[in-house]
Amino acid sequence: MPVSEKHLEEFVAGCRRVASYGLVRSSSGNLSWRVNEECMLITATKSWMGELTRDQVAVCRISDGAVLNDKKPSAENGFHFGILRERPDVNVVLHFQSSCATAIACSSKDYKNFSVIPEIPYYLGHIAVVPYLNPGSNELAREVVFAMKGHDLVILKNHGQVTVGKCFDEVIQKATFFELACEIILYAGDKIQFISQDGIDYLRRRYLKSV
């Protein structure tokens, strides 16, 4: 197998950390990690990230998604290897379903602005939205990959969210900050106050200088 035991252990630890922050429940969500130019690890179908073992990790080829071990990858593997192909700056892809963010994903209200705390424009920028499409479908994978070309977080209507980063820490940080912003938006309701456009532009410039 083209990955080491150390890689498997690191991936399992990353998955369990995602679950420890309340970003997934039982078998919801999935995670992938680029371990080298050719291969990625991804959670196996129906696995629980909070209780993941090395026997529940699929090894796939990034170029075409071919499975390189005997584990069946998550049904959402299509957008995982698609994003890793299109985004060489990204090593980790997380599909999560935290409570408040998913409540907004399931709302009929058209949420467009999430800049209620500095962390959103600084770390995430503009949030993309993909309409509801069947889970695991080629159509969903295609839409998510396209949206992720210019964004670091995508809302999947009536489904959840996808975010990306260079490492496990980065995707957890982005997902938890987005969950916090959604929680604030839901709690504040009509009294919500957003950061001004000047403030958003300033934070984005600061982020771009830091990367």
Image (cartoon, helix red, strand yellow):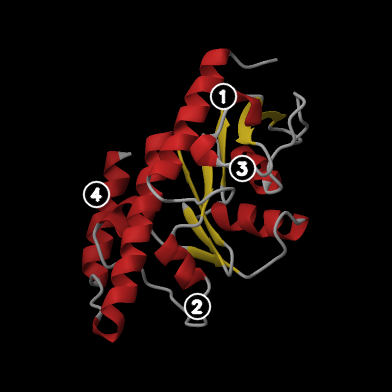
**Disc 3, disc 1: CB below 8 Å?**
no
Q: Which mark is residue 107?
A: 2
Amino acid at circle 3: Glu
Residue occupying the point 46% across, 29% down: 13
Q: Which mark is residue 206?
A: 4
Query: What is the crowding at mark 4: few (fewer than 14 residues within 10 Å), some, or many (at least 20)?
Result: few
Badge 3 or badge 4: first in the primary sequence: 3
- The x, y position of residue 36, in whole percent, is 58, 22
Q: Residue at x 63, y 52 (%)?
A: 145
Amino acid type at image mark 4: Arg
Tell me the residue at 73%/30% (across/down).
Answer: 71
Secondary structure of residue under mark 3: helix
For residue 86, which quarter of the picture?
Answer: top right
Mark number for residue 86? Answer: 3
Q: Is residue 68 above or below residue 136?
A: above
Camera-near label (3 vs 2) is: 2
Q: CA distance from mark 1 to mark 4?
A: 30 Å
